[in-house]
Image (tube, rainbow, N blue to C red):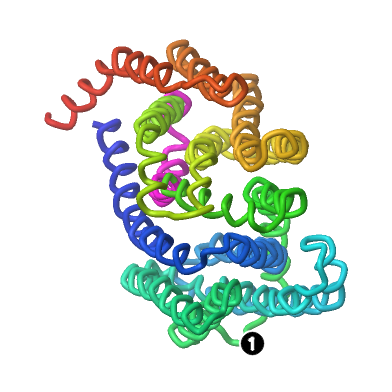
Amino acid sequence: MKTKSRLKLFLENFLFYGGLSMLTKALPFITLPIITRLLANASAYGIADMFNLINSFGTAIAVLGMYDAIFREFFEDRENNNYQIKVTSTGLIIVLGSSIVMILLTLLFNKYITILLFENLKYQGLVSLSAFAIGIAGISTIVAAPTRMRNNRRVYLYTGVFFPILGFLATYSLIKLNYTYEAIVYSNLGVSLTSLITFYILNKRDFEFKSFDKKIMKELFKIGLPLLPTFLIYWVYNSMDRVMINRMLGPTELGIYSVGAKVASVSQLVYTAFAGGWQYFAFSTMKDDDQVELNSKVFEYLGIVSFCLFIIAQPFIKPVFNLFFTGEYIKGSEVFSYLFLSPLMLMLFQIIANQVIVIKKSYLSTVALSIGAVLNIGLNYILIRNSGISGAALSTLLSYIISILFMSCICYRYRLIKLKMRFIIISLLMTIGILSNYFLNINSLYLYAFNLLAIVSVYIQDVLKINKRQVK
């Protein structure tokens, strides 16, 4: 009965919150082929992507981990509305100050940043614009937080659908007015500003400047600042490949890579669904006697689901790119496989990393991530030179796999994970198939088909047992 209720808890959170996030994130996939047909020159898409990378890096610093800190401290006293207002107000004032600092620093070092990222001073205006985009995004992150913390699902659904549509319409209109990369940049900035204004109107009762509290500020810094390195490490995983492609191969190759990555991020819908249900499930079961066995099963089963999705996607990659894209963008199919699997590997990392958080040794997950991030930069430097954008995609995937291996060793050392030999063998076969496809240029479809057959034969009994339990 206990196992059944926990499975139900996980699936309910997975399907509801994850499904809601999947719906709001699916819209850009529909609009992407339209935008790329209008922007025939892939370099325009690449330059716009660099603008987004600057924003994501700056915003991670500007927020200072305050979103998670506010979320944690908000529920410290559920019944005290005045305390909750103090938490949100203090968090907003902190991020408002850090956002202003980030704007000033970006403007001050504008020329240096432009040379570093673009090697061309004609993009100085773009970097200046990104300074204000960082400030808007940082403040908007906190202003929108009360909607999520108060579990106002309807508002999140409506805004999640409305803002992507607004962004697409703005981009489409500006491209028709003969703007290129500026169309994406201006529309992103406009949507971010609209989001800030919208959520401030909805949540203004949660923010009072007079409610700033120094004691709460210390608590927020205590929770938030240790998270900042992790966010920056994730930025390395998600963005360093693009920075290095732009420097080593140019904006055209970056544009092709970005489109391929965008299509491959369809797997992030699975990751988003997982993230929506995982956190509550993980911490609500952390004191159970069989917690290690339970999370080991979740890790194994979601690993197998990830492998199956990866294998099933393989025959459709080239037909999809040939059908929906034209010109240079078709080359984006080269990076799809590796970048499709990468978010799913991140999902597995977060499952296993949760084990060290439970025993209050979260720094170990940061160590494992850091090792992968350093290897990511090194592999990108080597593989981009040798193989171009496909090398960058493989570097990202291998970095996640290496981080999972380190995290597995750590958890095994503390007896926090129990992996079955069948899963280890399947994982090795998958890795061999991926590396053979890349380094030996072997058509790995047959090997993947063999892996899928092995997975079905080994795990069919588990599927039948789970199904039997649900029927009962």
Percent from the top left, x then y, of residue 432? 54, 17
Q: Magenta region: which residues?
A: 268-294
Drawn side of residue 447 relative to residue 392, left or right: left
Q: Residue at x 35, y 20 (%)?
A: 452
Q: Quick check: 452 above or below 4?
A: above
Q: Which residue is mark 1?
A: 209
Residue furthest out toward the left: 472
Type of the residue with mark 1: Phe
Q: Residue 451's quadrant in the figure?
A: top left
Q: Quick check: 459 above or below 372?
A: above
Q: Residue at x 20, y 21 (%)?
A: 464
Is disc 1 surrounded by few (<14), some (14 to 19) or many (20+) residues within 10 Å? Answer: few
Dominant SS type (magenta): helix
Percent from the top left, x then y, of residue 255? 59, 57
Q: Residue at x 37, y 14 (%)?
A: 450
Residue 76 shows up from this direction: yes
